[in-house]
Amino acid sequence: MKKYMDLESEKNLICQMLIKPDIIAEVYSVVKPEAFADPDCKASYEYLIKAFNAGQVIDQSMYVIGCETVLASRRSEIAGATFTASNWDFYAKRIKDNFLARTCLQACREICTGLTAENAAESMSRLAGIASEAIDATGTGKRTVMGSLAEKFSEELDRRFQQRGELRGYDTGLNNLNTLLNGLPNEYIVIGARPSMGKTALGEQIAMKLSEKIKVCFWELEMGEMSMFERGLANISGIEMQKLRSTFMSENQLSIVSGKIGVLGANENFIIRTGTRDIDEICTASRAEVLSRGCKAIFIDHAGLLKSTGSHRASWENFVEISHKLQELQRELNVPLVLLSQLGREAEGAKSTTMANLRGSGAFEEDADIIIAIERERAKSATEYQIPTILNVQKNRNGATGNVYTIFMPAKVKFVDGKSPEEMAREENKS
């Protein structure tokens, strides 16, 4: 059995959790305590999970001092096992695989001892049961009995009835979009557009609106924090970006901007994350933002800049891995996860787009709950302030699809509600 006990991996994983506590939530989704072969490593793991769930500050010193179920000499040994936390998933997989191997070997030994032709069917059933329990213990997947959902849904139905007339999701700040989606739901949402067509502006504007009520984590992989701040300031102040970045602001404009700076300065709900493009690091940190810091929505700008561990593979394979991980993250955390994505070059100049125009479209088409494409003409001049823009909801797994009519004001980095051609025709006829 020692063949399937990798004690070095167990010690390294515990040490990595001490070095970088942000990975704890993701580690627990992969490995359960039962998977550890070493009793001290198992006790250490359970101690860290309990401390993490209690919101305690986790580091090497708190473990060495506080984990009294493990001998002091072993605590020091485990805490000093490694100096990096960059490859925790490698050790987690080793621990999980060894646990499955030990379980399989033990089960086969026990069953083979009394195996006869007469009890073969029963023995196979026992083996399948042991295998199922072992897989559950690794944290792989989730098993739910349909009947257990009845009471939970009844409570949800009652809540919906009490809140009838209100949006089910979060207010996006765009009434037309709220009407079609019934607010921004707790789903995996992809917003696609060609470069410089407003996808970041739309994502930031919706995130800003949400941050009036809830904490939002916005991963900005392209711009710096101050660029994000400037764009947000232009959006809420109505002062053009060109004016904000120039030395020709009037006193009145300066007064307006100063007031809005105070508004943004008081906003502690909008969290900007930068500094990494690695999908595993982003997923791990997002879990910490939601589970430990109370964030209720995640935005990522944008898909084309995300990197996966399989960088040597074809780009479409990386998109598949990235999309699957984001889908799993959204399902686990049950918050809106909005991924901004570029459309392929074939969408340039097209009157309308399809889901196939999304870069890495196969993965996004399959995984996303909602897909929205931004469709508009490019500005014909630098003085064009209002551009009719369609938010084409091409996929909505749990609701309606269709066009949402808006006006994009590039100088103010802002979307406002627009009118459909039918509405404009009716107004013209009345006049």
Image (tube, rainbow, N blue to C red):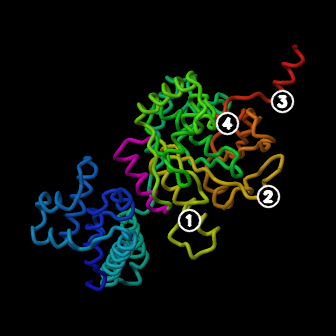
Q: Secondary structure at mark 3?
A: helix
Measured in 3D between alpha carbons, the distance from the residue under mark 4 to the one under mark 1, in whole angstroms, is 37 Å
Three-letter amino acid code of the residue under disc 2: Glu
Q: What x and y, as percent, mark residue 220?
A: 52, 51
Give the residue at mark 1: 321
Q: Quadrant of residue 410?
A: top right
Measured in 3D between alpha carbons, the distance from the residue under mark 2 to the one under mark 4, in whole angstroms, is 26 Å
Measured in 3D between alpha carbons, the distance from the residue under mark 2 to the one under mark 3, in whole angstroms, is 26 Å
Q: Quadrant of residue 135?
A: bottom left
Residue drawn at (49%, 63%) of the image: 278
Sequence-earlier tag: 2 or 3: 2
Q: CB under 8 Å between callouts 2 and 3?
A: no
The foreground one among 4 and 26 is 26
Q: What is the span of residues highlighted in magenta in the rendered image?
A: 278-296
Give the residue at mark 3: 421
Q: Residue furthest top?
A: 431
Residue drawn at (27%, 70%) of the image: 36
The C terminus sits in image quarter: top right
Q: Residues within 10 Å of mark 2 (few under 14, many from 20)?
A: few
Q: Residues within 10 Å of mark 4 (few under 14, many from 20)?
A: many
Which disc, if any, is residue 346? 2
Please say if 54 is above or below 317: above
> Does 299 sit left or right of 112 as displayed?
right
